[in-house]
Amino acid sequence: MNHKPAAMQTALSAKEMEQFEQDGYLLLRNMVPPTACEEMLSITEAHLRSAVPPLEYEADVGYPGAPASLAAPGGKTVRRLRDAYHRAACFRQWARDASLVAGLAQLFGEDVYLSLAHHNCVMTKHPDFGTATGWHRDIRYWSFTRPDLISVWLALGTENAANGGLKFIPGSHRMQIEPAQLDALDFLRPDSPDNQALFEQGITLALQQGDVVFFHSGLFHAAGKNTAASMKASVVFAYHGKSTVPIAGTKSAAAEDIFLGRPAQ
């Protein structure tokens, strides 16, 4: 049986919208009920056991400390279950949830679209081989006419510093970053003095099952290694407004964009 996420009781407040504009992220506690989270988590675990494609492995990402190849120890540790939208109805229900779309429409101020080209996954981070992710912006590898998308992160369980939880630099989506601060992959360089000051502003979000985070595609974020005893799993989708269009011929235009709704009148 599929369990739909419960709707938010009220629309986003003016304070919440201001916080998103100022900090680049908004944390909504207990937005999705345990029944819906457990259903998504159960399917995630089943698909991991059966290695249901499409998958991304730790060896594929090439991050520092990741296995060097699929044949290396931990090489076939799954980093992401790709195309979550088509894996099960419960993921589609969450991606299209009316309360979620209503909040996004408030923030965009226009029609809301779901991008299946980016995120659209269950992010998993396993003990031992769940490598750290450096400070980066999602928009670094997305190609749209405007850099204003919102990623929506749903915690299927507890997330904290010990198991590689999300870290943000609040307000960094509004900062001017010089090319010298970035490496060849557009990650913030650890050896840059300017970046050291930015890193000191970083915070780790402590999330519980059902918590949801909206964050701007230009916000610098990172995640540590999973040093806990169990896997961490999060569902992530990316959304944009009508005026933000994927550029033809790029990866951002390689999959469907789904119209979800309009702002309340």
Image: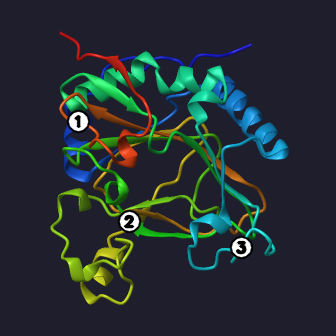
Q: Quadrant of residue 20?
A: top left
Q: Quadrant of residue 245?
A: top left
Residue 180: which disc? none
In the depicted structure, whether residue 34 falls above or below residue 167: above
Q: Which residue is painted at 74% across and 33% down in the image?
A: 43
Q: Which residue is painted at 52% across and 32% down in the image?
A: 30
* 172 with respect to 160 (left or right): left
Question: Residue 259 placed where, x, y %?
Answer: 35, 20
Judge the density around disc 2: few (<14), some (14-19), many (≥20) Cα neighbours within 10 Å. Answer: many
Kindly report which numbered mark, 1 or 3, lies closer to the viewer in this rendering.
Answer: 3
Query: Which of 134/118 is in front?
Result: 118
Name the secondary structure under disc 3.
loop
Residue 162 in view of the camera: no
Residue 136: which disc? 2
Q: Which residue is mark 3?
A: 69
* 165 with respect to 151 (left or right): right
Q: Are dots 3 and 2 in contact, CB under 8 Å?
A: no
Kindly report which numbered mark, 2 or 1, lies closer to the viewer in this rendering.
Answer: 2
Name the secondary structure under disc 1.
helix
Judge the density around disc 1: few (<14), some (14-19), many (≥20) Cα neighbours within 10 Å. Answer: some
Label 1 sits on what residue type?
Met
In the depicted structure, whether residue 228 falls above or below residue 97: below
**Sequence-wise, which precedes: disc 3 or disc 2?**
3
Residue lying at the far right of the rendered structure = 49
Q: CA distance from mark 3 to mark 2?
A: 23 Å
Q: Which residue is mark 1?
A: 17
Q: Which residue is painted at 30% across and 77% down in the image?
A: 182
Residue 176 in view of the camera: yes
